[in-house]
Amino acid sequence: MFDLKPLEPNDDSTDSRIEIKEFSSFRKNFDSPAPNEKQNVPNAVFGRELGKIYPKINLSRYGASKNWYSESFMSQVKKTPLYETHRALGAKMIPFGGWDMPVQYSGIIAEHNATREAAGLFDVSHMGEIFITGEPKTVLDFLESVTCNSVASLSNFQVQYNAILNENGGLVDDVTIYKFSAEKYMICSNASNYETVTEHLLKYLPASGVKVRDQSPNWHQIALQGPKANEIFSKFLGRELDSIQYYHFALLDYQGEEIIVSRTGYTGEDGFEIYSSVPFGLKLWNGLLEFGKPQGLLPCGLGARDTLRIEAKYPLYGHELNSQWTPVESGIGWIVKEKENSYFSSGKILSQKKNGAEFKIVAFALTEAGVPRENFRVLDFQGNEIGKTTSGTFSPSLKKGIGLASIRTEKIRDGEPIQIEIREQPKQAIITTKPFIPGSIRKN
C-alpha cells in the first residue's frame, strides 16, 4: 500500500493544483493562435473529430482547447435546462462535450470536500438517455451482441456498468444499462457520445423486433452524492430510500411526477442519480439545494466531479477509455464476460482477460511534491519509458498528486515505484491497484 501522508506542493506546483488554468498555458498543445482575451480552461485534453466542417478539436472533461473559441464551434454549444440557474449561482461556465457547463461555483476544493463530507449536487442533464424496446428475446440478444458485460444477468430495476464495443473491440462508449422489464431497457451514455452510440446501435439493429430511440432531449438528470445524500433525499421526498440497493433504481411518484431514482454515481460516495421530465428537473434542483443547505449540501461543477472520480479510480471516456483500447486495456476488464452470444472481438478480449494485455490502466500517487497531468511520460527507475499518464490532478482528500496511467502490464505491481516526468523533471511515485479513497457506496 502507498503512504497516505499528505504532501504539500512546492511553490513550483501550487498554481496548477486544482484551480482552473488560463488558456495561455496550453500553447504547447496546439498550433492555433491564443485569443486576445484569456480564457479559463483546465488542462486535461483529449482529441475527438467533430466532422468535416470543423478542424480537429481537443475536448477535455472541461471543454475544448483547439479553435474552441471560434464562432462556428461556439454556435453549436448547447445549454442544459439549468443554464440560467447556474449563472445566477455564480458558476464559472465552460464548453464541455458540446455543452456550456459549470466547472465550479464556490471553488473546486470546497465542492470536492462537501461531497466527501456532506453532499454535492451536480447537473448531469447533458448525459444521454437511449431507450431499447421490443420483443424480449430479440432485445436481449441485440444488447448482448453489442456489449461485453452480461445483460442477461440483470434483474428488473437493476443497473449495470457496461461498454458498447466497436468492430475492433474498442469502446464506442462506457454506459450504464437500466432494465425496466424484459421488453424495455435504458442506456445512459456520455454527453459527447450519445449520438454516436445511437448511430452505432441503429447500424446493427436487427430487421425487426427492436426499437432504438434517443430520448435525451426529453429527460433531465441531476446527481446527489455524498455521505449525507440518503438522509437529505429521503427527508426531501418524505419516504425511506434504503430499499434501493446499490446499482438498482426505482420509479417513484413525487408531487404527481414520476421520477427515476437510481443508487449510482461517479464520485465514490453513496448517492443518487435522479431522472425526471425537463420542467420538473429545475424544481428538483432548486428544492434540493434549499432543503440540503443546512446539512452542508453545495452545488458542484465538473472540476470537483473530475477530482472525485480520479480519487475513486473511475475512468473517463477520452482519457482512460477510447475507440482503440479494449475494456481490458482500459482497466475495466472486470466487466468482460463470457456469454452465450458472441460480441465484437469477444475472442480477442476474453483472451486478454485470461492471459493479460500488453498494457492497461493503473492508478499512481506521487511521493514527492508535484501535480501530474494527462500525457506525461511514465518511467521506471532506470529511466525507461513504460507508459503515459491519462489523467492527473491534485487530490484535495490526500493532499498530493495522483493520477491514472496506461503502462506496460509487466510493470504493474501494487506499491511498485515509478517516476512521472513533470516539466521534464522525474517525480517519484508508486503504483496502486486500488482506489485512493475507500468507497462508501456499497452500503446495501
Image (tube, helix red, strand yellow):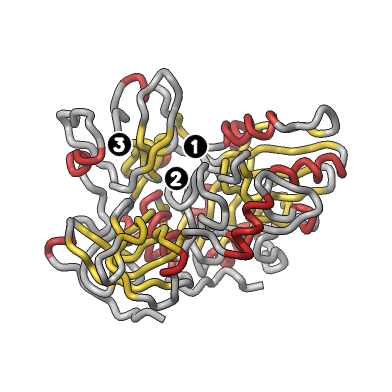
Q: Quadrant of the N terminus?
A: bottom left
Residue 97 horizontal side relative to residue 376, left or right: right
Q: Which mark is residue 65?
A: 3
Q: Position of residue 414 (x, y in %)?
A: 44, 76
Contact between labelled residues 1 and 2, with CB atoms less than 8 Å apart = yes
Specify the farthest residue to the left: 11
Q: Position of residue 120 (x, y in %)?
A: 45, 58
Q: Position of residue 168 (x, y in %)?
A: 59, 42
Name the residue located 60 percent from the left edge and 46 percent from the top edge. Answer: 169
Residue 157 horizontal side relative to residue 348, left or right: right
Q: Quadrant of the C terminus?
A: bottom right
Q: Which residue is mark 2?
A: 318
Q: Compared with residue 213, is residue 113 higher up or lower down, i.e. above or below?
A: below
Q: Which mark is residue 192?
A: 1
Residue type, mark 2 in image? Gly
Residue type, mark 1 in image? Ser
Residue 348 in view: yes
Residue 198 horizontal side relative to residue 431, left or right: right
Residue 294 in view: no
Say which label, 3 or 2, has the lower sequence index: 3
The CA span between labels 1 and 3 is 15 Å
Name the residue located 35 percent from the left edge and 61 percent from the top edge. Answer: 386
Dot 2: what SS? Answer: loop
Dot 3: what SS? Answer: loop
The quadrant where residue 407 appears: bottom left
> Between tags 2 and 1, which lies in front?
2
Residue type, mark 3 in image? Ser
Dot 1: what SS? Answer: loop
